[in-house]
Amino acid sequence: MKFLKNFATESHRRDTEKNSVKFCEILWLILFFCQLLFAQQSPDLYFNTARDKYVGGDFVGAASDIKESKQLGKNDEEIKTLSAQVATSFFTAACEKYTAGDLFGAVNYFEAGLELKDDQSAKDIFGLCLSEIVYKFYSQKKDYQAAIPYLEKLTALFPADEEYKKMYETAKRNIIRGVEALPGVAPKKDTKQIEQLFELMETRLQKQEKLLSGYSAEQQQLVGRIIDNARKEKDEFLSQIKSEIENENKKTKNIFVFSTSAAVGFVIFITFFLVFLLARYLKSGSSVIVFSNRKNAMETLSKTAKRLKMSDAKKEEKIIDAEPLSEKMALSIIEKEMFANHSPISDTPAAEGILNSFLESKNSDIAAKAAVSLYNYNPEKALTVLEKLLSESDEQKRLAAVRALGEIASSVAINMLLSNLSGAGKSVQRETIKMLRNIMVMKKSDITDELQKKIKNTLYSMKDTWIIE
Amino acid sequence: MAKKIILVSDDVEETLELLKYSLEIAGYSVITAKNGEEALKQSQELRPDLIILDIVMPKIDGYTVNSKLKESEKTKDIPVVISTTRGLMSKMFSTDGKTKIDGFLEKPYTVEDLWSKVKEILEDGLWSKDK
């Protein structure tokens, strides 16, 4: 029984303790929530967190808490000072954004700053920044509709400003004509009205410039930059618009002329194309040979010669009258084929037959080049040709012969060069010295000591008048 | 009017003598350098009115001398004439088209060619104004 009584007493004590603990917990929670509720609603607490956020660099958070604190009734010097500080930070950030080219970012910061502090100079700069955005929409993006909200911001910022109001109304009424057109359809541009708007902007910007005297150096710099940019944008845009309109007019006027010209041009093109095809066909013989192999060289050469009509009586006339470039090309191709693998082909009469045609060329360079090739088959004949060229009155022919003799560089050729020096004109002399000097440098081992000495002595004898080495 | 000074640089003694003699006859004061190093030193010290450089020279070649002259504040405005053969000249053009070269004398050339080029640069051209 006693045990039961004790048990009952103990159980009651435990229940009482449990209930007591529960009550305390509930009370503590109620107190906690009350504290939270009242603390959150305290303007001072908002102010304190705003100050902490400002110190920590969170200006947006600070601005939000300042707003809350003001709404809860805090309006003392303390919060005014903090507001001004945060606003200044926003204005600085706005300037930085502007400098970085982020105009829209600058707008956000200006707006945030002006919510905290009514600063006239910041307003003025913000107004200019908005003006520049309007210009950008007009000139770069051609998005007239998008410019309207920024003009609205301007009118809200300066409600008493008649000029901004006029600008906004002008834009709404006149410039945005056609803006409601289907997406992708460009609105009509009214140059006169746009020009008027820009004139208004210009007047406004000039006024703003006068305000500069009251600004700090940094602000003045920023305003100056905005004004410059705005003017530049204006000029570019106007000239672009004007040129677009002029072009459109020109296009319309010239459409008939263009069509007619195109038709005439087409006929001329077709005619030239047919003439080109015909000329190409006539000259085509010289290009095929390059692709033939050495085994069939002579066969191909003969075919080419036939194509070029070199085997009949008309061949010389044909080749000599040919255009120098194609003649040169033909000789070059034939030479390549003849001296493939660095050794001349064995069919001497055939080779001579082909080269003969080129020896009589009116172009002295081609004749001399052909003589160099001929030297491999018939040296005597080649040197006779060159000797004849060397005695010509035409300087170009003599120069070509000197170059060819220098390339051949046999003992006979060298002696011809040496005897040519005296009495030759200055250009021929210069070319001969060059050839002799080259022979002494490049082909010294191919010539006898006696000939080397002869060249040296000759060149030495000229050293009083010529700088050779 | 003071005589204009021309620096001639060539490793071939006879050429150097001929150039010196020919230019002195024409009324110029001539200083000579037998190699590129000497040419650079003389140019810095004496600042001549014109420099005639051979390309193939011992120690420093004429092309490098020209580049160094054009790099230096002291000598960058002195006109330089390169005296060379055609082969070397074209090689030089292909290696560096940026380096300024004021004139060429292609070997072989006569004394008259030399006078004409010098006159062209010192008396008729951009550098004709007296210092």
Image (cartoon, coloured by chain):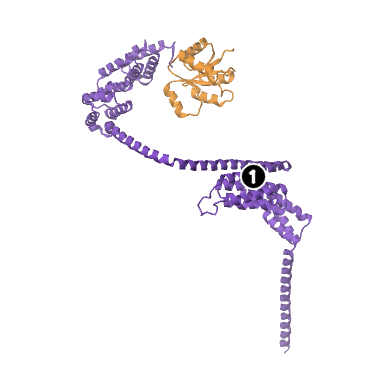
Chain colours: A purple, B orange
- Judged from this view, the residue extending furthest toward the bottom is A1
- Judged from this view, the residue extending furthest toward the right is A77
Number of residues whose C-alpha sits closer than 10 Å to that of mark 1, classed few (under 14), some (14–19) or many (20 or more): some
- Three-letter amino acid code at disc 1? Leu
| Residue at 51% from the left image edge and 12% from the top image edge | B23
| Residue at 51% from the left image edge and 15% from the top image edge | B119
Q: Is residue A109 above or below residue A73?
A: above
Residue A170 left/right relative to A321? right
Can the viewer see residue B121? yes
Can the viewer see residue A109? no
**Image x and y of residue B109, in percent:** 44, 16
Which of A24 and A198 lies nearest the eye of the viewer? A198
**Location of the N terminus of chain A (image quadrant):** bottom right
**Image x and y of residue A110, in percent:** 67, 50
Which of A396 and A36 lies nearest the eye of the viewer? A396
**Location of the C terminus of chain A (image quadrant):** top left
Q: How many discs appear?
A: 1
Quarter assignment of residue A267: top left
**Image x and y of residue A321, in percent:** 29, 24
Which of A235 and B51 lies nearest the eye of the viewer? A235
Chain at numbered mark 1:
A
Q: Is residue A430 above or below residue A166?
A: above
| Residue at 31% from the left image edge and 26% from the top image edge | A323
**Image x and y of residue B3, in percent:** 57, 12
Which of A22 and A235 lies nearest the eye of the viewer? A235
Secondary structure state at the residue bearing disc 1: helix
Q: Is residue A202 above or below residue B57?
A: below
- Residue annotated with mark 1: A200
Residue A66 left/right relative to A440? right
